[in-house]
Image (cartoon, rainbow, N blue to C red):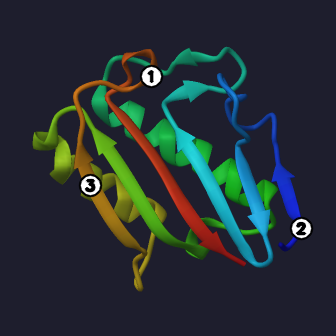
């Protein structure tokens, strides 16, 4: 098996469980799920959905950069929402962080997320 390199940065929330922020194997980086925690306080950014989405993208950006890449290197993005009616808002905010060609993506409705977050995202990046 190829060497696993653990990616960690203090510019994204620290893991709140038994996982790494990301793991690099070869030229592929597996990004763990990010919720809208502010890295410096480990508190939720706010109860506002849009602000939560922005914070999640900022957290993902920090982990991508720590791995030596950027958001444009994400090839697959998974978005978990407790309310799928926010889908259009996610698309609007996502357009600030990605340009074409966009990554493959899934948007999945779930009952609950860690710390009662409204959104969580994970992904796969190739650098």
Residue 115 picture location, percent across and down:
45, 16
Residue at 16%, 53% (x, y): give it.
88
Mark 3 or 2: the one toward you: 2
Mark 3–mark 1 CB contact (< 8 Å): no
Residue farthest to the front? 1
Residue 112 picture location, percent across and down:
29, 24
Q: Earlier in the sequence, mark 3 or mark 2?
A: 2
Residue 20, quarter of picture:
top right
Q: Is residue 7 left or right of residue 77?
A: right
Q: Is residue 8 left or right of residue 87?
A: right
Q: Residues within 10 Å of mark 2 (few under 14, many from 20)?
A: few
State the quadrant of the C terminus.
bottom right
Q: Earlier in the sequence, mark 3 or mark 1?
A: 3
Secondary structure of the residue carrying numbered label 2: loop
Position of residue 46 relative to residue 19, above or below, is above
Residue at 26%, 58% (x, y): give it.
91
Q: Which residue has dot 3 on it?
A: 107
Q: Which residue has dot 2 on it?
A: 3
Secondary structure of the residue carrying numbered label 3: strand
Q: Is residue 98 left or right of residue 63?
A: left
State the quadrant of the N terminus.
bottom right
Q: Residues within 10 Å of mark 1 (few under 14, many from 20)?
A: few
Alpha-carbon span between mark 1 and mark 2:
30 Å
Residue 34 picture location, percent across and down:
54, 39
Residue at 50%, 51% (x, y): give it.
122
Position of residue 48 relative to residue 91, above or below, is above
Position of residue 17 relative to residue 56, above or below, is above
Alpha-carbon span between mark 3 and mark 2:
31 Å
Q: Which residue has dot 1 on it?
A: 114
Q: Earlier in the sequence, mark 1 or mark 2?
A: 2
């Amino acid at each position: 098996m190829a060497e696993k390199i653990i990616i960690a940065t203090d510019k994204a929330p620290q893991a709140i469980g038994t996982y790494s922020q990301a793991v690099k194997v070869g030229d592929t980086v597996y990004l763990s799920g990010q919720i809208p925690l502010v890295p410096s306080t480990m508190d939720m950014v706010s109860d506002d959905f849009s602000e939560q989405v922005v914070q999640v993208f900022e957290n993902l950006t920090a982990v991508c950069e720590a791995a030596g890449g950027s958001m444009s290197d994400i090839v697959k993005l998974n978005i978990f929402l407790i309310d799928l009616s926010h889908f259009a808002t996610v698309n609007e905010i996502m357009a600030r962080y990605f340009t074409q060609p966009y990554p493959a993506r899934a948007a999945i409705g779930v009952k609950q997320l860690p710390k009662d977050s409204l959104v969580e995202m994970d992904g796969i990046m190739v650098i």
